[in-house]
Amino acid sequence: MNKVYGVVFKDGSKTYFFKGNDSYEKDDYVVVDTEKGLQYAKVCQIYNDKIAEDSLKEIVRFATDEDTQKYLKNLKDADIALKKAIKFANDLGLSMKIINAQFTLERTQLLFNFTADDRVDFRELAKKLASIYHTRIELRQIGARDKAKEVGGVGICGEQLCCVRFLQTMETISINMAKDQNLALNPSKINGVCGRLLCCLAYEDANYLDASRGLPKIGDVIKTKIGEGEVVSVDVLNRKCQVMIDGNKEDYYIDEDSKK
């Protein structure tokens, strides 16, 4: 009976699901069948309770020493191909930044990821690369957040980027998340190294939304035991606000049993 396995093509990358027999263990290196061809991968998860669907591609076999040597050679050759592609793109005057290059295990495809502000006509670049490597060339435009995941780095928290370390999917982040958490809308504080809103804004968003239920907004006029006043600040997690009453700021706890 086939099991479902999660594999990664490099550490910290997205997990992909494949089916295979029950002989594979976590941290085994394997060869998997993908739409792009055979790929070298590492088993990172085993799902004993998941049913292997027919649509899942298969783990072909354990990786051999020969596969490992091919993989390591492909890494070196891909680095050389990246430098060539960057030079060709500059010579052709293309407004693009090529981030990385990757061969499939059997070198049936050479994939380049790049960023650009607009659409790029890279047909001439693909022809020049194909004439050298005699394989299928694919150039894929990615976003700023995907670039950060590919390149890596350290966030403003001092830790390795979440997208590199453990995030498998990129959630949609909105400016409302920062507003809900009463964060200063300063790009240097709420943007990551990719220049987009911090992924970690989503981590506590549900808690803030839950804690904010029933809280007044800044500018609301509310009645307290010591008088009526205007709300000038709100502490969501402590369910507390400051109310301006007769020229003085007074702490007001929303829940009656903890009201100050």
Image: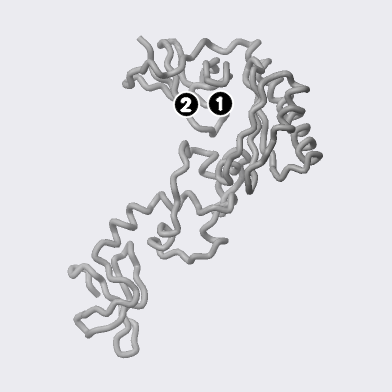
Residue type at the position of mark 2: Tyr
**Label 2: which residue?**
16
Tell me if residue 243 comes above or below residue 122 in the rendering: below
**Residue 92 position in % (x across, y down):** 78, 39
In three-dimensional space, the C-alpha distance between marks 1 and 2, rounded to whole angstroms, equals: 9 Å
In front of the other: 239 or 89: 89
Horizontally, residue 128 falls left or right of residue 234, namely: right
Q: Within 10 Å of the Cα at label 2, are there few (<14), some (14-19), or many (20+) other Cα atoms?
A: some
Tell me if residue 102 comes above or below residue 87 in the rendering: above
**Residue, far right:** 91
Q: Quadrant of the C terminus?
A: bottom left
Q: Within 10 Å of the Cα at label 1, are there few (<14), some (14-19), or many (20+) other Cα atoms?
A: some
Q: Quadrant of the N terminus?
A: top left
**Residue, far bottom:** 246
**Label 1: which residue?**
9
Residue type at the position of mark 1: Phe
Tell me if residue 157 comes above or below residue 235 in the rendering: above
**Residue 83 position in % (x across, y down):** 77, 34
